[in-house]
């Protein structure tokens, strides 16, 4: 451990010298502190899971550490608690174990073992060429934590709704309590945290929900080997409006979405080498997943349809498609991944095939009948007026609303 500290100080000094000579302004190396936890190398620790009987309880497992008693170095046994997932990975030969770090906290100490697994996976671009590629779209929300749709050959083959089982409401109640307590105590003291237990509880429940949902999504992915997992690029949503507790709750919900995404990515990659792709989230909840037209959200109350922005249902005025709004958004993610409907390449160079030499003049191939061609030109003229035009190479209009100047 002393050697470890010496090594850290030396590395800091050499890093600092390098930084001074490099002449950079940013990135001055920080001095080594408590967050640079000491690493225990092979001759200083020993953890033998196979020698101990794990069935009688987690307490029976010991880690042997070489400690300095003041007069000499001795081996001592320390009881450790392990999670069953750690044990499974420890026994699995596919996982590699690195030297642990010793983390000393206020009332406890922990050994953190980095576990590494090498995963072979296909690149997204290569697997996109497979015509029977399975894509798993995940739409993350507040109450329906995740809506998973599985698509193959342009057909949705599985849909799973993963709800939060009242987590959002429960968290809101806790945060309301915190807000009230803060209001009662007045201005908080600097450097002091209040309501620690409640916050810890909120954090723990959030963390637990994220792991559970991530595990469920990873299990769905495992059913379809070689599939691609789709997530939206998460937007930065500023919580605004409403009471303090409402804003705090929204912030927590946003954090939960990020956690679910991260954990799912890791779990799916480690367990079934599923690659995750991020798609353009623009308008996934606004456009119809069947025809691509802009729809509206509504809720039905007393048998009547009431159009409102926060409605849970989606309605398309052009093809009269009705669905759960989150489900519609989840289906749209596949379109976004394949750049279909609303998510086509806007850049003309990518949308159109290269022009060919035709009857003495340059023209795009397969333009259709002269009448269609005329219509196409008219559309082009209209399109330039509103800035962006999407014209299919064969004159067909892929999306009736694409020409109306929607971006
Ligand atoms: Zn529609």
Image (tube, rainbow, N blue to C red):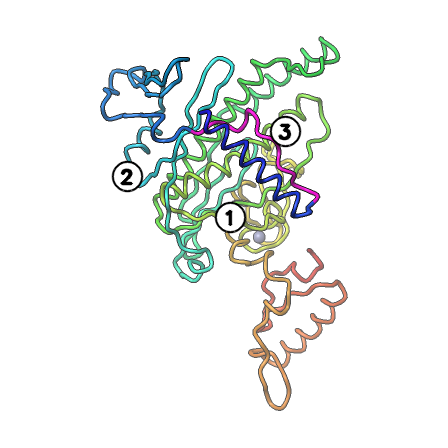
- Residue density around tag 3, few if under 14, some if 14–19, many if 20 or more, within 10 Å: many
Q: Position of residue 236 (x, y in %)?
A: 65, 39
Asked if the stretch drawn in magenta spans residue 32, the answer is yes
Q: Are marks 1 and 3 in contact (CB under 8 Å)?
A: no
Q: Nearer the viewer, mark 1 or mark 2?
A: 2
Mark 2 — residue? Answer: 93
Real-space CA distance between mark 2 and mark 3, rounded to the nearest whole angstrom: 42 Å
Q: In the rendered view, does 154 fall on the left or right side of 89?
A: right
Q: In the rendered view, does 324 fall on the left or right side of 346?
A: left
Q: Judging from the image, what secondary structure is the residue with disc 1 in? A: helix
The numbered mark at residue 250 is: 3
Q: In the rendered view, does 67 fall on the left or right side of 307?
A: left
**Disc 2 CB within 8 Å of nearest ligand 1 atom:** no
Q: Position of residue 69 (x, y in %)?
A: 39, 13
- Residue density around tag 1, few if under 14, some if 14–19, many if 20 or more, within 10 Å: many
Mark 1 — residue? Answer: 331
Q: Residue furthest bottom?
A: 360
Q: Judging from the image, what secondary structure is the residue with disc 3 in? A: helix
Q: Quadrant of residue 61?
A: top left
Q: Are marks 2 and 3 in contact (CB under 8 Å)?
A: no
The numbered mark at residue 216 is: none
Q: In the rendered view, does 221 fall on the left or right side of 366?
A: left
Dot 1 or dot 2, earlier in sequence: 2
Dot 1 or dot 3, earlier in sequence: 3
């Amino acid at each position: 451990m002393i050697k470890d500290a010496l090594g850290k100080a030396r590395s800091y000094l050499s890093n600092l010298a390098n930084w001074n000579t490099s002449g950079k302004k940013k990135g001055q190396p920080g001095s080594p502190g408590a967050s640079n936890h000491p690493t225990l190398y092979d001759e200083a620790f020993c953890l033998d899971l196979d020698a101990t009987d794990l069935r009688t309880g987690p307490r029976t497992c010991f880690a042997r550490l070489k400690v300095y008693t003041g007069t000499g170095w001795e081996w001592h046994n320390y009881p450790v608690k392990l999670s069953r997932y750690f044990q499974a990975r420890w026994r699995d030969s596919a996982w590699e174990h690195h030297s642990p770090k010793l983390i000393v906290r206020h009332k406890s100490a922990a050994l953190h073992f980095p576990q590494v697994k090498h995963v072979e996976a296909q690149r997204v671009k290569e697997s996109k060429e497979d015509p029977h590629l399975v894509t798993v779209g995940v739409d993350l929300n507040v109450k329906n934590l995740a809506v998973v749709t599985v698509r193959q050959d342009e057909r949705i083959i599985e849909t799973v709704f993963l709800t939060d089982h009242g987590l959002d409401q429960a968290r809101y109640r806790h945060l309301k309590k915190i807000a009230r307590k803060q209001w009662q105590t007045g201005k908080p003291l600097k450097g002091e945290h209040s309501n620690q237990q409640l916050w810890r509880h909120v954090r723990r429940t959030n963390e637990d929900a994220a792991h559970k949902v991530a595990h469920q999504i990873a299990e769905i992915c495992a059913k379809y080997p070689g599939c691609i997992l789709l997530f939206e690029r998460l937007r930065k949503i500023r919580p605004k409006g409403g009471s303090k507790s409402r804003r705090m709750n929204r912030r927590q919900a946003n954090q939960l979405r990020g956690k679910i995404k991260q954990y799912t990515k890791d779990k799916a990659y480690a367990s079934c080498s599923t690659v995750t792709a991020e798609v353009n989230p623009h308008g996934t909840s606004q456009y119809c997943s069947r025809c691509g037209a802009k729809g509206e959200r509504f809720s039905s109350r007393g048998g009547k349809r009431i159009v409102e922005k926060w409605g849970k249902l989606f309605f398309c005025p052009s093809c009269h498609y009705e669905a759960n709004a989150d489900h519609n958004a989840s289906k749209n993610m596949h379109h976004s991944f394949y750049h279909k409907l609303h998510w086509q390449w806007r850049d003309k160079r990518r949308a159109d095939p290269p022009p060919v030499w035709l009857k003495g003049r340059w023209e795009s191939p397969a333009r259709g009948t002269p009448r269609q061609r005329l219509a196409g030109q008219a559309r082009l003229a209209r399109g330039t007026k509103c800035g962006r035009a999407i014209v299919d190479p064969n004159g067909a209009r892929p999306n009736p609303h694409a020409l109306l100047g929607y971006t």
